[in-house]
Image (cartoon, rainbow, N blue to C red):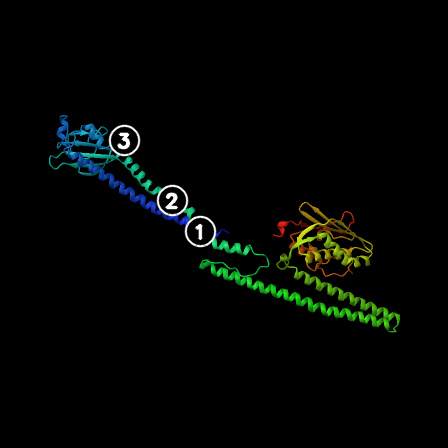
Amino acid sequence: MISIRWFLTLTLIALLVLVSFLSSLRGYRESMAEAETLFDLQLLEHVKLLGLLNPASFLFGNTLVIADSVITTPAELELSLQLLVVYQIFDSEEKLVIRSENSPTDNMAAFVPGYQHAEFNGYSWRALVAQDPLDGHWIMAAQRNDVRYRLAETVTLQAVLPSVIGVPIAGLLIWWIVGLGLRPIQTLAASVRAREAGDLNVVELHDIPKELTPLTQSTNDLLSRLAMAFDREKRFAADAAHELRTPISVLKVQLHNLLHDLQSRQLPDAAVQTTRQSLQELGQGIDSLAHLIEQILVLNRTTPDQYMRQFTQVNLLALVQDVVSNEFEQILARDQIFSLDGLPAFVFGDDTALRSLIQNLLVNASKYTPLGGQITITILQEHSKVLLKLEDSGPGIPEQQYAQVFDRFYRLSDAHHDASITGSGLGLAIVKHIANMHQADIQLSRSKSLGGLCVTVIFQAYQQDNAA
């Protein structure tokens, strides 16, 4: 869509060109008519000047006196009357007495007083014929029409040319003035763009035009509503975390007590075994429910608006070591072999969110890797990139499902995967969400060394300007 500045500039220039064209056209016509009148007046002045002469003096070659001035010859008179004008003087008997050099020998117009159209010497002429009322001699003066038109157009175009040249100059001025008028909008946009993701304070601009006041107020109203919505979301997450964890903890304690009471009673072995199995399945269900609640809370808490303000320098190797120490019991329980290879590498991010990302990847790898399998985590730094690579010896993921596994609640239904393995379907969705928040890329592939899944998370290496 065209910008407001371009729209206003092009529209105003188009109107300016249209008005300039119409005014120039009208001015051209009026100037041409005015020039015609001036040329006719010039012919009249020439005729009056010629009327002051005594035609008889030319018959005898005598000198002439014009208004008591210096005597002139016919050649000098012709020069004074300008080369553009040709003339003829006839006596009362319509006999040619004198003529200009480029005039015909015959009368160039009819012996009728007034302005006439004449044709001679291959040109069209504008002629003026006058008769002296005293002695009856005739005076004829004429100008070429093409010369008259050319001179008139030259004068007219010189008058119109500044208006034509002024159009591009006016266009530049309009562009600058429109930009100046739209500058408050750019200031408002820059003020909103420069804010951090979590800054929802009202926009304060001074000396803004009245037309921008509704837009500023609407922006502030939107920011206020967003602030209240985020506040409600944060309170909900905190309340849900408290309200949901407490009853689950109580259920776990009661389940533990039931198992203890069951062991202390004298019941048949078969009944004890059946009851214990039921209670264990109940415990697994409670653990799955607790895990699902934790995952949902993590997914809702890790929003860019809340976490990007907490980004700091994070040692990825130390963070992986800490997560592994917390989850190592599960790895040992499944008799799996774990190895960690790498050197300290630093990224710019949130410690809590990155911990959740590593934990979900490690738990998923341990869960789907068979008993006695192998899990490897490698941390590499390549120029400005930090690679977190986790490989396992499990069944892996079919390549056609690489994109789908990041969807919420998506579970693999492949025949190679154990359907009895419990999960919420949120682990990789959380990983993808946190990776996007850190502007990191995730790549899934087949592990070349272990044969299972290889998950590679590519971060930007920490640099001092990241914190700015």
> Is the residue 279 above or below the residue 394 in the image?
below
Q: How far across and how far down the image is residue 335, in percent?
A: 83, 56
Give the residue drawn at x 78%, y 65%.
284
Give the residue drawn at x 83%, y 67%.
277
Q: Between tags 3 and 2, which lies in front?
A: 2
Q: Which mark is residue 178?
A: 1
Q: Quick one: SS at disc 1?
A: helix
Q: Could you tell which of marks 3 and 2 lies nearer the N-terminus?
A: 3
Q: How far across and how far down the image is residue 340, in percent?
A: 77, 51
Q: CA distance from mark 3 to mark 2?
A: 41 Å
Give the residue drawn at x 15%, y 36%.
131
Which residue has dot 2 on it? 166
Q: Between tags 3 and 1, which lies in front?
A: 1
Q: Which mark is residue 122?
A: 3
> Is the residue 131 above or below the residue 219 in the image?
above
Kindly tell me whether residue 417 is visible in this rendering: no
Q: How far across and how far down the image is residue 4, in percent?
A: 47, 52
Callout 1, which amino acid? Val
Label 3 with label 2: CB-CB less than 8 Å: no
Q: Alpha-carbon neighbours of circle 1 within 10 Å: few (<14), some, or many (≥20)?
A: some
Kindly tell me whether residue 158 is visible in this rendering: yes
